[in-house]
Amino acid sequence: MDRRNFLGLSVAAATYGIANLPTLTRAQEMKAVDDQQFWQGITDQYDVTDQYINLEAGYYGIMSKPVMREFMKNNQYVNQNSSYYARELYYGDYNKIINRLAGKLNVGNDELALTRNATEALQNLIMGYNKLKAGDSVIYADVDYDSMQSEMRFLKTYRDVDVVKINIPEPGTYQNILEAYQKALNDNPKCKLLLLTHVSNRSGVIAPVKEIVAMAKERGVDVILDAAHSFGQFDFDFNDLGADFVGFNLHKWIGAPLGVGMMYISKDRIKDIDIFHGDSTQNTDINTRVHTGTMNFAAVLTVNAALDFHESIGIKNIGRRLRYLRNAWVNGVINNDKIEVLTPQDERMYAGITSFRIKGKTSQAENKELMQLLFDKYKIFTAAKTGLNKGSYIRVTPGLYSSHNDVAALSDALNEITS
Ligand SMILES: Cc1ncc(COP(=O)(O)O)c(C=O)c1O
């Protein structure tokens, strides 16, 4: 007998998530990006404050209401059943979730492990990558995430390699970004490892990953891919990218509760990542490559509900809608010669996230001031950021809860500020 039935536990909470979530679209049904009724229906599935317009969905993706409800049930369930759940049932649920995620990415279920976030996955991959010898070099770029950059720099101490930082051209184009990586690889023939970010958290630029990975592999260089922002934001064929070592988030664009990420190691490359510090189980199980400690069980369980909700809209609809919202404000300022949009107008290179600055305003203080003005006067929340070679800027990220009016309010505000 199933243990849960035997114990009379709440089966619904623990197994396949949301039984009664309304099916928003029939599978694969394409929705017009400006279908007011449909997208209002999605917005209504989120409980967001009406005190200001949140255009900073890039930090993490809030849960929709049905996912939140399921999370609360799962919290209660885990709390009621405590270590019995953790010891006897969790791994069964964990494996079902891994199978489901593996099915979505079309990879083996032995190639994925859940982590607490993308950082944990990528730290393990960068530190664990064991093919580096003293005197080799590794490359990362200014568009990469801060803590991944510092992890790469630490390889100098940890593996005695030369660490090379490159700057990605701004404005970027498909071609000049490819050329920047090509030049970096050509200039550093001892390079063995490249960090590559699928969607930059700074500029929102989607890198030509497939071409860069192929270019690197041709030269015997491995790539660690930071996919923290891509999985769930837009449609792509994961296998087509050719990446062997990847870190993901499920609490950004999949909409799971905070505290769930994922690590991918291609099956035939598992030995190139060290067994985690002192783990004595000498085998090729991916779970020997990351030790998360106790996970937030309820958050993990709720991945099912998040996937149900996400799939009920469909990744193609999500990607197209986010691009539409992005275009709605960008098109409102693109002819304003006082504003620099940092994310190229090439559909291959952006989804929802796009950054800008007022021309010449490159200091952090100036961008913080602008962010504050947008918030105080226009009630629009954005993020002033640093880290790009050419200076500070503002990042704008609508979410599935954003409306056309929300993003139009931003372009109207920017045009007024610069008039
Ligand atoms: C590109 C990129 N990589 C990694 C991370 C780290 O994600 P987390 O903080 O969830 O570990 C982020 C977070 O914003 C990111 O944008």
Image (cartoon, grey):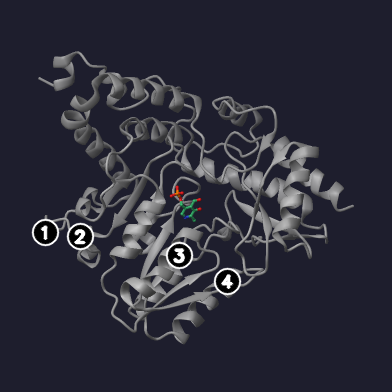
Q: Earlier in the sequence, mark 1 or mark 3?
A: 3
Spatial separation of the CA atoms under disc 4 and disc 1: 40 Å
Q: Is residue 267 above or below residue 155?
A: above
Whether residue 276 can be seen here: yes
Depth-wise, is mark 4 or mark 1 nearer the camera?
Answer: 1
**Residue drawn at x 68%, y 27% as measured from the top left:** 50
Which residue has dot 4 on it? 168
Which residue has dot 2 on it? 275
Whether residue 145 can be seen here: no
In percent of width and height, residue 278 lies at 18, 58
Q: Quadrant of residue 338?
A: bottom right
Left or right for 198, reference 190: right
Q: Amino acid at mark 4?
A: Ile
Q: Amino acid at mark 2?
A: Ile
Q: Earlier in the sequence, mark 3 or mark 4?
A: 3
Q: Amino acid at mark 3?
A: Ser
Checking the image for residue 186, the label placed there is none
Which residue has dot 1 on it? 282
**Residue drawn at x 34%, y 48% as measured from the top left:** 262
In percent of width and height, residue 104 lies at 34, 45
Q: Earlier in the sequence, mark 4 or mark 2?
A: 4
Mark 3 close to ligand 1, CB under 8 Å: no
Which residue has dot 3 on it? 150
Spatial separation of the CA atoms under disc 3 and disc 4: 17 Å
In percent of width and height, residue 155 lies at 37, 71
**Residue drawn at x 62%, y 61% as measured from the top left:** 346
Depth-wise, is mark 4 or mark 2 nearer the camera?
Answer: 2
Q: Is residue 250 above or below residue 185?
A: above
Q: Amino acid at mark 1?
A: Gln
Left or right for 236, reference 167: left
Spatial separation of the CA atoms under disc 2 and disc 1: 8 Å
